[in-house]
Amino acid sequence: MSYENSRPPTSILSRQARVEGPFGMIGTPMRFARNSEIYGEDEAAEYLYQMVSGAVRTYKILEDGRRQIGAFYLPGDIFGFEAGETHISSAEAVSETRVIVVKRAALMVRATHEKDLARQLWDATAQELRRFQEHLMLLICSAEDRVVGFLHDMARRAVKHAAIELPMSRQDIADYLGLTIETVSRTFTQLEQNGVISLPTSRRVELRNRAMSNRNMAA
């Protein structure tokens, strides 16, 4: 993907009038088609993105060819934070996704003069670090605990906490949890048989027994 005259990525399907985006900055609304790239690994980290609708995954391709998903972003989330000047992973739209894009440099300039904005940036960065740490801790758990932990995280971020509409596929979940798709599918089936969840559809998950889920996570 190329950048031209410091403009956002050219794979965007549509652009609209500029609106208020993350941290009160004026940004550009954009829409990405399912599976389209938002930015690539090692590209210049010129923008921050606020989720409006849809879902986004960030990922790296490992040396053995496997894909490791680092994070999922849902409506309200902000992504694109980097410690350096380039992205350390790629970002793709999981489903049709709308975001508001703001220039990172303009945000940094404002933050040097506005203490409240600087605090908001710090809070957002700390939240990103916390998600990274929680993901690392999840990867050392058993397969069942990884899936249960993932579902609890999705439920916590969902509007209706007892029912989750998963925008991502089982393969996405497997690549996020460091498991095979067969293990993820088998674990979903076991959790349903144990009464922990119900699966009205392949993407809709209902938490049936939160206490049992908590015991599974603590095991």
Image: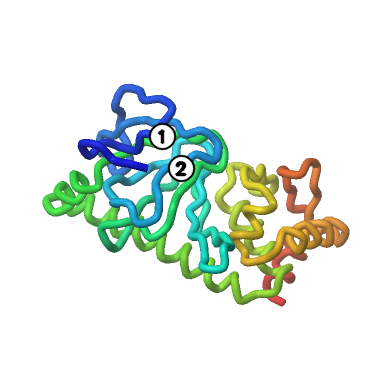
Residue 107 in sight: yes
* Rendered residue at 78%/41% (across/down): 201
Between residues 173 and 166, which one lies in front from this camera angle? 173
* Placement of the N terminus among the 4 image quadrants: top left
Q: Position of residue 14 (x, y in %)?
A: 41, 25
As drawn, the residue found furthest toward the left would be 113
As drawn, the residue found furthest toward the right would be 193
In the picture, measured across the screen, residue 148 lies left or right of residue 159, that is: right
Which badge, 2 or 1, is on the more N-terminal residue? Answer: 1
> Measured along the vertical axis of the image, is residue 140 above or below residue 161?
below
**Element on which disc 1 rests:** loop
Residue 24 in sight: no
Q: Where is residue 141 in the image (x, y as percent from the top left)?
A: 65, 75
Q: Could you classify mark 1 by the number of other residues whose Cα lies within 10 Å: few (under 14), some (14-19), or many (20 or more)?
A: some
Q: Which quadrant would residue 25 be assigned to in this image? A: top left
Location of mark 1 (residue): 11
Which three-letter amino acid code belongs to the residue tagged 2?
Glu
